[in-house]
Image (tube, rainbow, N blue to C red):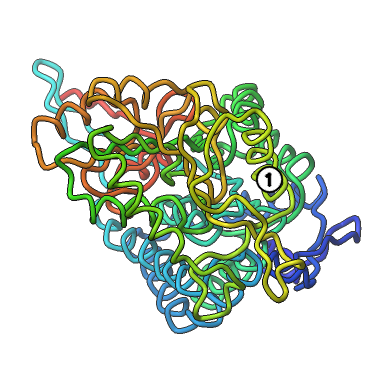
């Protein structure tokens, strides 16, 4: 499969390729061009040349293109979902939901096309003023492999509807779905050069994109260390930046919570996408008075999960996406067992079933009795591993939940409105759920605090990230 630059499928200038593999089978799915600095420059130039024409198109016309793209995506949902499952590993049902989510994001921003407007401001004694909203120009995004379709939608939809042109750098191991989605925009009538995709590693294609003087905005989703590097490079060119840098999301279960509902929420919130979601439940704090009962319910749910190839309709949890993540999860469990710093309730091993030796499979794992300095509670654990910590009360739960450098999401489960209010006020997170976890609609702003980044995606807030406000004052 080739990169998309200036509306055309092209090979890399260096003529080199890398393979995209199925993490469940090790099978080579496709080779993708290894993008070079020259390829990034060509993509940025294409976007720059297309900017004036796209910016002059009315927001309603831009919305029409996005709507047609959404229609095509929905028509090809099964094909796109199968491709996503094969390169990412997630179960087919989850892949379908992600593809539908991508289409929904496009449709949502179509609906906002008519709301792109400035303000009228009377200025007593000096006439009046008004503001206009202008697109920034060439914008770019670097996206991860865990939710490649949905996050692509979060980046490009508000940017395109605002009149910007775009260069996308997808993750190397999940480029196929992004390239296919980009080609759909061409079918939908998007002018050449408005959306470009350059594949390749972050240290070359990604850095070149961030350094490019023509790029006025960078949106990055990924781990914190890389995000800080992006922010550093972008600052040199005074570029706008949005950073979503992951998290270590806590889930607090109070003694008055609906335990059945909370157990289901924890199960889905942790093990969806094999635990490879930024807002997944990564730390579970349970009141000690209900801990035994709750853990038993959760253990039953975890044991019911069926591990396998995502294309198998009976699979509820697929493989980890890549060897690095697989080795990391194995290392965490081995270290915990070696130090006797936790008790495995269920899971904790590489499963044995026909074909499992060819993929990056790991059992969904539930752990208790972990000490406060455990890596399971301090790091962003991307994988099917959930530590459960007992606490005396809400004050202790909030104190422990906030004991992290991250601040993306959190949830509190209770029937008491005062407890819910306290949790929402005191938990350090950009998004807080009450009696649910991880559901994110395109209508609401999404982003983190502390080392989970800054800036907001989704909702009307995202539009301001891609537009410049110009003030005009008229004396009458």
Q: Quadrant of the N terminus?
A: bottom right
Residue under pointer 1 = 330
Q: Is residue 132 left or right of residue 394?
A: right
The reply to whether residue 317 is in sight is yes
The reply to whether residue 276 is in sight is no
Neighbor class of circle 1 (other Cα within 10 Å; few <14, some 14-19, many 20+) is some
Element type at mark 1: helix
Q: Quadrant of the C terminus?
A: top left
Q: Quick check: 53 above or below 313?
A: above
Residue 33 lies in quadrant = bottom right
**Horizontal and vertical percent position of residue 26:** 77, 68
- Count of all numbered marks drawn on residues in the image: 1
Q: Is residue 394 left or right of residue 167?
A: left
**Horizontal and vertical percent position of residue 413:** 22, 42
Q: Residue at the spot x=72%, y=65% of the render?
A: 359
Q: Residue at the spot x=90%, y=59% of the render?
A: 16
């Amino acid at each position: 499969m080739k990169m998309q630059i200036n509306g055309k499928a092209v090979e890399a200038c260096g003529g080199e390729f890398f393979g995209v593999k199925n993490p469940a089978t090790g099978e080579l799915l496709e080779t993708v061009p290894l993008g070079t600095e020259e390829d990034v420059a060509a993509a940025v130039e294409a976007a720059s040349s297309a900017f004036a024409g796209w910016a002059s198109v009315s927001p309603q016309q831009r919305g029409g293109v996005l709507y047609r793209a959404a229609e095509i995506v929905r028509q090809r949902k099964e094909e796109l979902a199968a491709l996503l499952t094969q390169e990412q590993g997630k179960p087919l049902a989850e892949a379908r939901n992600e593809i539908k989510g991508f289409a929904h994001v496009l449709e949502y921003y179509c609906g906002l096309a008519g709301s792109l407007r400035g303000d009228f401001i009377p200025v007593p004694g000096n006439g009046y003023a008004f503001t206009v909203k202008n697109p920034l120009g060439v914008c770019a995004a670097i996206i991860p492999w865990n939710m490649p379709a949905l996050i692509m939608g979060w980046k490009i939809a508000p940017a395109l509807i605002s009149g910007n042109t775009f260069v996308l750098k997808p993750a190397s191991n999940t480029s196929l779905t992004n390239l296919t989605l980009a080609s759909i925009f061409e079918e939908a009538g998007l002018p050449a050069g408005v959306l470009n995709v350059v594949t390749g590693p972050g240290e070359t294609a990604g850095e070149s994109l961030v350094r490019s003087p023509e790029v006025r905005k960078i949106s990055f989703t990924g781990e914190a260390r890389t995000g800080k590097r992006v922010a550093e490079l972008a600052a040199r060119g005074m570029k706008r930046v949005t950073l979503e840098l992951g998290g270590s999301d806590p889930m607090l279960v109070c003694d008055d919570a609906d335990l059945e509902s909370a157990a289901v929420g924890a199960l889905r919130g942790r093990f969806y996408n094999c635990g490879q979601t930024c807002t997944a439940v990564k730390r579970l704090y349970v009141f000690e008075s209900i801990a035994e009962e709750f853990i038993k319910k959760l253990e039953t749910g975890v044991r019911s999960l069926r591990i396998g190839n995502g294309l198998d309709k009976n699979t509820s949890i697929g493989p980890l996406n890549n060897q690095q993540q697989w080795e990391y999860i194995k290392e965490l469990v081995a270290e915990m067992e070696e130090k006797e710093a936790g008790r495995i309730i269920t899971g904790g091993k590489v499963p044995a079933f026909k074909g499992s030796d060819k993929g990056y499979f790991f059992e969904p794992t539930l752990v208790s009795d972990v000490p406060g300095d455990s890596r399971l509670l301090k790091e962003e654990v991307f994988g099917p591993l959930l530590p459960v910590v007992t606490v005396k009360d809400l004050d202790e739960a909030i104190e422990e939940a906030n004991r992290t450098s991250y601040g993306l999401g959190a949830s509190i489960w209770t029937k008491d409105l005062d407890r819910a209010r306290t949790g929402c006020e005191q938990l350090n997170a950009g998004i807080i759920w009450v009696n649910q976890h991880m559901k994110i609609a395109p209508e609401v702003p999404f982003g983190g605090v502390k080392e989970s980044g800054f800036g907001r995606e989704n909702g009307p807030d995202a539009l301001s990230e891609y537009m410049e406000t110009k003030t005009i004052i008229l004396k009458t």
